[in-house]
Amino acid sequence: MAFAVSAIARAEVYTHKHRPEISELALSDGRTLKDAKILSDTAYTVTVASEGKIQPVDKKLLPAKLLAEWPIDEARGEKERSAERAKVQARADKLASDADKNAKIAEAMKAEEAQKNAAYAAKTEAEWKASEAKFYSGIDALARSRNGALIEGVASSYGNLYVLVRNVTDGSVDFDWPALRVTPLIYKGEHQLAGQIVMRGQTENVTIPAKSARVFRLKLTSQMESKSLRWVDRPEVYPVKQLYRQRNSWDMRDEYQVERNGPPPNDDEVTNALLRATRPFVVAPLRK
């Protein structure tokens, strides 16, 4: 019973407005709409169907009788304008928000691109400098070498010389050790080496493969300690590092009997010691 009363109350409140069908609707602007039917309205217009077309018509153009049934509603108009302004403002706010978001995204992308470009430029410059350094290093090494054989360090151990020689070319080269001249620690002048050359137990094996290094042991006929070494036809002077063994470590103490009675140093020990040795003094600069 309560449901029925509620339904009746709603029917009384929400009544449908009469939608007349007019054979000829004469508007105050001079137009005549035939077979017209008012479908709906807004605060200031009515929607009219006429001859298969649907169009809005300003309520001020309606005849007085129809205008009384479909009056202009200022309060409704204000609500519609407020709603429209709210929609416009919402669209404007969204556009502003989107623009701000897009600007931030564009700024972030620009910063990221700048960072990538800077990183790429730094990487390219570093690679170029490394390539240039490698190139000039190769040129310097070749210029400091003798026929491609570059001496990287010399050591003396109780008369025997250990020479670390690197081949800086793309082909094999021979270590022309008889062309070396040695300056003794005690005696005056330079001396040509005489004796045997040993490489891992083999004698007269002087070939160095491409882009590799070998340690040559010059087993001299005399126990002459050496001060420096150089090629007979080059100005570079290679200081000789004095190596003495004591308890399996290199130092500067004279342990002659220990060294003479013990095994000679191996290639790895000599190589490590020579690579820490002072580089040769170059008389004239190779390049500016």
Image (cartoon, rainbow, N blue to C red):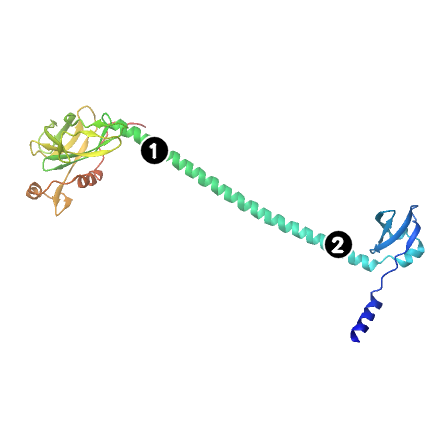
Which residue occupies the foreground of this view, 138 or 254?
138
Q: Which residue: 66% across, 52% down?
A: 93
Q: Residues within 10 Å of mark 2 (few under 14, many from 20)?
A: few
* Numbered label tally: 2
Left or right, 202 with respect to 33, comes to left
Secondary structure found at label 2: helix
Left or right, 247 with respect to 285, comes to left
**Quarter of the image with the C terminus in it:** top left
- In the image, is residue 122 above or below residue 96? above
Left or right, 43 with respect to 233, comes to right
Q: Are marks 2 and 1 in contact (CB under 8 Å)?
A: no
Q: Which residue is mark 2?
A: 84
Q: Residues within 10 Å of mark 1 (few under 14, many from 20)?
A: few
Res 280 → quadrant:
top left
Residue 85: x percent and y percent? Answer: 74, 54
**Quarter of the image with the N terminus in it:** bottom right
Kindly identify which numbered label has been placed on residue 133: 1
Q: Identify which amino acid the numbered label 2 is placed on.
A: Glu
Which residue occupies the foreground of this view, 285 or 245?
245
Q: Identify which amino acid the numbered label 1 is placed on.
A: Ala
Residue 279: x percent and y percent? Answer: 23, 35
Res 235 → quadrant:
top left
